[in-house]
Image: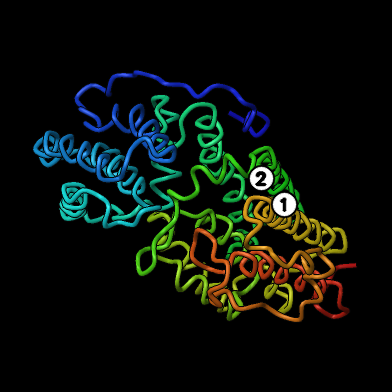
Amino acid sequence: MNSSQLFDGVAHPRHHTPPAPGRSGSPLRDYVLHSLPAALGDLSAKRLTHNQLADCQEQILRKVTPQCLSEGDERTARLLQLDLLFLLSGYAPAGPQAAPRALTELISAQCGRFPALDPHLSYEFLIDVNCEEYRRSGDIRVFSAGRDAALERDFYLGHHLSEPWAKSAAYGLRSLVLPAAAARPSAVLDDVVECLAEFTRYMARYRKLSQQAFNRFRPYHMGHPGGPRGASGAFMPSVHLLELALLPPSKGYGIFLDQSMSYFPSWSRPVIARWRGDSIRGANVAQRLRDGRLVLDRAGRDRLVRVIDKFVDFRMAHLGITRHALPEAFRERTGLTRRDIREQGGEHDILDGRDPGTSGFNVRHVLTNAVYRLLALRDDLAHPGFAPANQ
């Protein structure tokens, strides 16, 4: 699937692919794929209560628990955990106390047997594990039923399929600041621009997702007061690698990274930590230009400005889509243009508690701060003497 196919209204596929040879697959697969979305629809329509849902799931879990605890295959454990977390997230609007005890006990038991498993519906499970299974077998877990299922599917796939473009852009910029720096920085910057353009094309498709459809499944992504943060796109790791390769983290961005580290996919946590430390110590494109260890001619600096502009394009597209999807977080409609954000005078507090996004941070401030940092860097590049240049 490419970006042009996202949110195109194609019916949600329901495959019945048998597990791979020698693997039993998740014993909850059929229930989560077929019965759970319908049950959640009945809950929303008040044809079912949370107590009735819990009683039904309690019976199912008692039957499958011995099989679950006998499985030793790591891939099966990840799929089972995904299914268990989907069940648990079905109770998010009512609070975790509504979930059956057998469910929370089995999640804890699985985490004890496989310590790398997240105990909550994380970005890694919702997006990566879920979409990898879709690409392997055609199975994808969604909370929605009917026509909305395909839209929810594409919401997850868009994140998963677009991230390699952001990751390629990040590693391209990273190659410019390593000890053995890229021999042809202008060619690298051209590649980065193309990667960011494709990444933004995926983001632009999210304009086709209606606010109504989004709000039908968003409540199941949310955390709860005192609990873990939700499964938010704010934790897509390669976007943060890209920023760390480009410029050093500000104080406010450092707070975001400190509080987000355990919510990034497991593969990315040591990478983000390493790149962050390197960036603080000067291993980023902006600092390398300042100290003269990265030298670009005028055409090369123009290419770098294009990189920043493409990154801003993505950030502004994300801002616009989020404002449409979550109008309650943007009650103040002014101050959201590029000019407004450039002139806001600094970063705003992401922990002020008003209008938190799924990630638990102030969604407006997270998004506008990200644009502000990039625009400030762009303005710095235009300042005489920012960086030596070959004429």
Q: Nearer the viewer, residue 81 or 212?
A: 212
Residue at numbered disc 2? 203
Q: Judging from the image, what secondary structure is the residue with disc 1 in? A: helix
Q: Do the residues labelled 2 and 1 touch (CB within 8 Å)?
A: yes
Q: Which residue is drawn at 60% across and 56% down?
A: 170
Q: Relative to 225, is 352 above or below?
A: below
| Rendered location of residue 132, percent (x, y) | 42, 36
Q: Residue furthest front?
A: 46
Vertical placement of residue 12 versus 330, above or below = above
Residue 45 location (% of width, % of height): 44, 37
Mark 1 or mark 2, which is nearer the start of the sequence? 2
Name the spot of residue 286 as percent of width and height, x first: 70, 72
Would you name the residue on which mark 1 appears?
317
Q: Closest to the observer: 270 or 217? A: 217
Q: How crowded is mark 2: few (under 14 residues within 10 Å), some or many (20 or more)?
A: many
Q: Residue at x 27, y 23 (%)?
A: 19
Q: In this view, does 34 lie to the left or right of 238?
A: left
320 up-or-down from 361: above or below: above
Question: Would you say 174 lies left or right of 42 here?
Answer: right
